[in-house]
Amino acid sequence: MVGVVFQLIRRRLGDKWISPLFPDKAKMVRSANALPVIFAIAPVLWLVTAFLVTYGKPGFLRDPSFIPNLFIGLALVSLANIGLTVFLQTSKKVMSARSSYDPVDRVFLKMVTGSILSEAHAIYGLVLTLLSGPILYELGFTVVTWASLWWVWKRFKQNITSLPNR
């Protein structure tokens, strides 16, 4: 229903249609370029937090035999998260109706969604580190976060160059 309304508005306004989120491509690119930096700094804060909380102390979990099961579970969830990120970034069908009336916002929303999904890896590492104690879990998941953010940003650059200039 919403798509039909936007199509009618676009048909009525023609080329005068302006995105409600971003009026032009240049403003969206400026906003989107700041996001990977923000999302890349957050895992550093999680590392500092985990270091300060667990330095020289055991984790919060009383039974350390549960840690391998938790690690396997979070690694599987992280793998599913990577799969979902790849699907959302590469699929032409995701938000395909939106691409006809607002391709700039579609590219931006795909990038934001991928960035948020990438940030989840750092949270998984933080949970594991706070429960177990060793900061190596957070370091590993942070590396995965940064790699995923880099890939999402690279896909964003590819998608944005394929858009027509307005």
Image: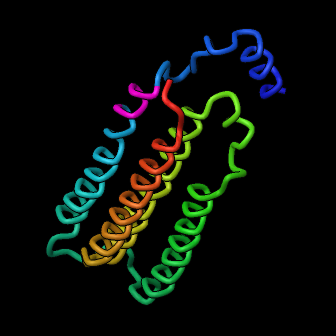
Q: Position of residue 81 (x, y in %)?
A: 55, 65
Which of the two residues, 127 or 109, is positioned nearer the viewer here? 109
Instruction: Please give left or right for residue 4 compared with residue 103 in the image.
Output: right
**Residue 38 within the magenta-colored segment of the rendering:** no
Quarter of image, res 14: top right
The residue under the point 77% across, 22% down is 7
* Start-end of magenta stretch: 25-30
Q: In the rendered image, is residue 63 in sight?
A: yes
Q: Quadrant of the N terminus?
A: top right
Which of the two residues, 58 or 145, is positioned nearer the viewer here? 145
Q: Main secondary structure of the magenta part?
A: helix
Position of residue 135 relative to residue 52, above or below, is below
Q: Position of residue 140 (x, y in %)?
A: 32, 75
Q: Position of residue 89 (x, y in %)?
A: 56, 55
Total marks shown come to 0
Position of residue 159 relative to residue 106, above or below, is below
Instruction: Please give left or right for residue 123 compared with residue 69 in the image.
Output: left
- Residue that protrudes farthest toward the left in the picture: 56
The residue under the point 19% across, 65% down is 51
The residue under the point 63% across, 29% down is 102
